[in-house]
């Protein structure tokens, strides 16, 4: 069983923790870089990307995360987490950590009154469509050749993307009872720890 | 069929008020009815829905572990964002100035709010007077991300709060105890904060209110079922929400601390007491060095369990805002008693 950390500097890290615990995964909270040691996977939760990036930089996460990601640490960013791990933003701020070959537009759907819920078909996911909660959500505007869109909106914009052991979702699986995305990420992290 | 679909979307973890909100808004029913009449089944993509209870509560969940800072101008909003605020609260005057100047405190000028919205990319909250649903309609039209129906402003209605379920934009409301928190949630508040005593720089009331709420939750969790109705009566709280707390042992929405936080240690104190995040009002822009103080409070809120980090960030900040003694304050000067 892989060991998964949840970045706990700001945002809804508790909801991710609870989702992982529901599927019986060993989970720890990460507030300082030393707490990344021994992890097979890291979830960067929803929250405010400007706040999260700043707290990552203050405590020296940037280079360590890059190194660990290139050495196979599985990383999943949800919403703000997608922004944090993107190579490029359409916005001037924040300065993302640049782990995944995607360009992301922040607040792509507008302000809070435009936040929404919608069912999505996800490539390779069995059963009902995944009920996705989008809150001031970002969207992927460009992706590199190694990146696969595993869920798209009806207008074709990618909202869940994967690049090997890196995963990013515009929406918040941790806000629902459906643990299929968490199980999927745990499988990615397990492959890395073999 | 409709019932099943609703249950699927508003599952066990959802609160009573959320289901009520959704059903009253008629959105779930309407969208599903359309689909059913179209002869489709559950597997079909349900249309995107905005303004749901889940997205209202969800934004507050994203703010957790963060610091929401009071700002009066776009420049202050930028300082707050650069210092790591997870959201800003737009208001006409910070609470300590409202206290000093007196007069009627109202919603901020729409131009100021728009300037703040345009200056930052983090969520922008704004304050409306208690019961002033038109100020709230205006704030929603301006595109603010959260409305604080706040005792810091002069109340517009001394009996009723706003019926917040009618709005697409979510609301945060203050409380001194669990009954007040649950009345606000019953009216549709998607986030709660302690009232504390705003504009004093004195943490004592925020501690009192947070401890009171937590203590009442623990007490209800340990009760037998036959005590719940009389508890609802005593707390003047909706019975369904008392039942929910009995089952879950927690509030159905996010709970922040507010009212009197002036230092990094104050913020960490409230976090250790069990709140989800903090609002800092006058404490930032009435301190000697707002940018430094703001950033220190952000760091202390994340690392609230690490006294070494709190010590480091507390060094060399200059003077915190000048505080006020609450114990000797006249009852008429206490903002926390506004709200019913």
Image (cartoon, grey):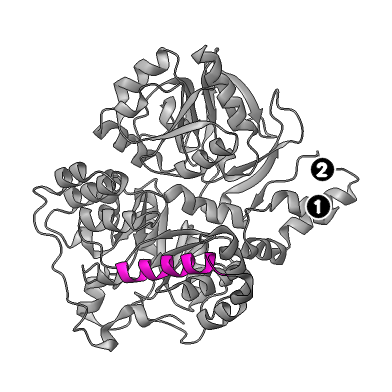
Camera-side residue of B65 and B49: B65
Answer few, some or many: residues within 10 Å of disc 2's Cα (few below 14, many 20 plus, some between 14 and 19): some
**Chain under numbered label 1:** B
Q: Considering only vertical position in the picture, is A98 above or below B191?
A: above
Viewer-nearest residue: B85 or A56? A56
Q: Quadrant of residue B112?
A: bottom left
Crowd tier of the residue under label 1, counting other residues whose Cα lies within 10 Å: few below 14, some 14–19, many 20 or above:
few
B210 in the magenta segment: yes
Q: Are marks 2 and 1 on the same chain?
A: yes
Does residue B203 appear in the picture of this structure?
A: yes
Establish if B44 lies above or below B180. above
Q: How far from the left and from the top, in percent, is residue B221?
A: 53, 64
Query: Could you say which quadrant of the image residue B202 lies in?
Result: bottom left
Which residue is more in the foreground, B189 or B274?
A: B274
| Magenta part, dominant SS | helix
Under circle 1, the secondary element is helix
- Report the Cα–Cα distance between label 2 and label 1: 10 Å
Please state which of the two labelled residues, at mark 2 or mark 1, is closer to the viewer.
Answer: 1
- Residue linked to disc 2: B42
Q: Position of residue B134 (x, y in %)?
A: 51, 75
- Image-quadrant location for residue A184: top right
Pointer 1: what residue? B4
Question: Could you tell me which residue is drawn at 18 percent across and 42 percent down?
Answer: B308
Q: Mark 1 or mark 2, which is nearer the start of the sequence?
A: 1
Q: Residue at x 72, y 32 (%)?
A: A121
Q: Badges 2 and 1: C-beta atoms under 8 Å apart?
A: yes
| Magenta region | B206-223
- In the structure shown, which secondary structural element does the residue marked by tag 2 occupy? loop
- Let me know if residue B68 appears in the view: no
Q: Chain of mark 2?
A: B
Where is residue A88? Give x, y as percent. 42, 25
């Amino acid at each position: 069983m892989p060991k998964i950390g949840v970045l706990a500097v700001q945002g809804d890290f508790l909801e991710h923790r609870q989702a992982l615990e529901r599927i019986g995964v060993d989970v720890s909270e990460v507030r300082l870089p030393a707490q990344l040691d021994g992890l097979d996977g890291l979830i960067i939760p929803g929250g405010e990307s400007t706040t999260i990036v700043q707290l990552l930089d203050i405590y020296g996460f940037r280079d360590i995360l890059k190194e660990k990601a290139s050495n196979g640490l599985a990383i999943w960013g949800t919403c703000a987490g997608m922004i944090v791990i993107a190579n490029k933003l359409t916005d001037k701020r924040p300065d993302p950590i640049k782990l995944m070959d995607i360009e992301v537009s922040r607040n792509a759907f507008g302000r809070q009154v435009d936040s929404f819920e919608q069912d999505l078909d996800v490539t390779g996911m069995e059963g009902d469509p995944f009920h996705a909660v989008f809150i001031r959500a970002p969207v992927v505007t460009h992706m590199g050749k190694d990146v696969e869109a595993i869920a798209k909106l009806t207008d074709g914009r990618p909202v869940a993307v994967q690049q090997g052991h890196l995963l990013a979702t515009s929406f918040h699986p941790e806000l629902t009872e459906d643990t299929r995305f968490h199980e999927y990420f745990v499988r990615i992290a397990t492959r890395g720890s073999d | 069929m409709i019932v099943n679909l609703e249950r699927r979307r508003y599952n066990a973890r959802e609160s009573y008020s959320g289901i009520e909100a959704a059903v009253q808004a008629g959105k779930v029913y309407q969208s599903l009815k359309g689909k059913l009449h179209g002869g489709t089944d559950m597997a079909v993509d349900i249309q995107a829905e905005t303004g749901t209870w889940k997205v209202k509560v969800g934004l507050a969940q994203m703010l957790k572990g963060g610091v929401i800072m009071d700002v009066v101008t776009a420049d202050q909003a930028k300082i707050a964002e650069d210092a790591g605020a997870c959201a800003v609260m737009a208001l006409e005057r910070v609470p300590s100035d409202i206290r000093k100047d007196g007069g009627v405190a109202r919603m901020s000028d729409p131009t100021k709010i728009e300037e703040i919205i345009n200056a930052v990319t983090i969520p922008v909250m704004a304050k409306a007077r208690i019961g002033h649903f038109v100020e709230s309609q205006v704030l929603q039209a301006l595109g603010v991300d959260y409305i604080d129906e706040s005792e810091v402003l002069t109340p517009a209605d001394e009996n009723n709060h706003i019926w917040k379920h009618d709005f697409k934009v979510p609301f945060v409301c203050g409380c001194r105890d669990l009954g007040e928190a649950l009345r606000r949630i019953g009216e549709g508040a998607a986030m709660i904060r302690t009232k504390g005593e705003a504009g004093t720089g004195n943490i004592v009331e925020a501690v009192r209110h947070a401890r009171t709420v937590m203590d009442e939750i623990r007490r209800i969790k340990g009760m037998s079922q036959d005590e719940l109705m009389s508890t609802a009566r005593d707390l003047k709280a909706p019975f369904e929400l008392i039942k929910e707390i009995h089952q879950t042992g927690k509030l159905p929405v996010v709970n922040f601390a507010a009212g009197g936080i002036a230092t990094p240690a104050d913020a960490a104190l409230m976090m250790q007491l069990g709140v989800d995040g903090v609002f800092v009002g006058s404490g930032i822009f009435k301190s000697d060095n707002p940018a430094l103080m703001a950033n220190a409070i952000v760091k202390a809120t994340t690392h609230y369990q690490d006294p070494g980090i709190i010590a480091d960030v507390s060094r060399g900040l200059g003077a915190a805002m000048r505080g006020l003694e609450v114990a000797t304050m006249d009852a008429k000067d206490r903002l926390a008693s506004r709200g019913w």
